[in-house]
Amino acid sequence: MKNRSKRYEKAAALVPAGKSYGLEEAVGTVKKFPAPKFDPTVTVSFHLGVDPRKSDQMVRGSVALPHGSGKNVRVAVFAAGAAAEAATAAGAEFVGFEELIKRVQGGFTDFDVAIATPDAMTEVRKIARVLGPRGLMPNPKTGTVTDDTAKAVKEVKAGRIDYKLDKNGNVSGAVGKSSFSEEALVENARAFIDSVVRAKPPSAKGNFVRSVTVAASMSPGIPLESSVYTKSV
């Protein structure tokens, strides 16, 4: 048995065993949880009926949250020339090419999103062993390989999140903070749920979404009714 805090136990008492929730009710319950000394992140997590070992069943994508994520996103951009200048003007924290690649080779990963121009990708692939395991490798499917670096930087800072299937068949994404209004959290969560449902690989057979849970940091998960995601799109 894990030792749970009194705050966690009080939150768990608000989630009856075996009950499934509509999205609005789930978010409303999260808002009722006893508040810790920080602003918890609210996360939506999927367990999917795909085989992570098969490349044709990979699930990944990105979605712009209507109300942002509430997170200060640190962005690194691998680019040179005008693209680098545009990224800097758009607010990217780390911009460069050869020098930035060398920093990453040395272990520097103090950023949340990496963006690269197509021309830079030949060199960026050399640090895939550093970026890949941390989910930081730029990818055209998530809009992080682009010549329009300014647009990409603005989008991720405004609340675009990227997601990717993990080795256990799970996908999760932060959809805001507990301090957000219920309406904002519901709209953000619905946008994320719709995006993941639409990302179903053509080769996936059977029940694509096994379960979906809403949770706040250091609080119990709240299972959603299947109607929330089977009717999403």
Image: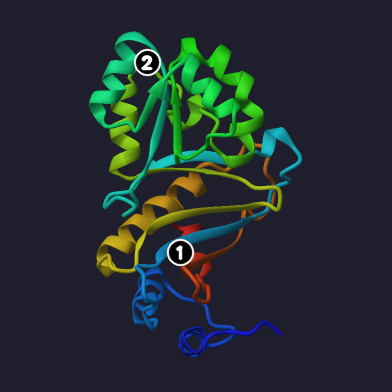
Q: Amino acid at mark 1?
A: Val
Q: Nearer the viewer, residue 199 or 125?
A: 125
Q: Where is residue 58, by image quadrant?
A: top right
Looking at the image, residue 72 lies above or below residue 62: below
Which tag is nearer the camera, tag 1 or tag 2? 2
Query: Is residue 53 toward the left or the right of residue 179 in the image?
Result: right
Tag 2's secondary structure? loop
Please identify the residue farthest to the right as the structure is shown.
53
Q: Where is residue 203, by image quadrant?
A: top right
Query: Is residue 32 toward the left or the right of residue 44 in the image?
Result: left
Q: Amino acid at mark 2?
A: Asp
Looking at the image, residue 205 lies above or below residue 18: above
| Quarter occupied by the N terminus | bottom right
Colouring used for the render:
rainbow
Point 36% across, 79% down: residue: 35
Tag 1's secondary structure? helix
As measured in the structure, the alpha-carbon distance from the residue carrying label 1 to the one carrying label 2 is 37 Å
- Per the rendering, the mark at residue 228 is 1
Classify 10 Å Cα crowding around label 2: few (below 14), some (14-19), many (20 and above): some
Q: Nearer the viewer, residue 138 or 205?
A: 138
Looking at the image, residue 43 lies above or below residue 120: below
Would residue 7 be visible to someone looking at this image?
Answer: yes
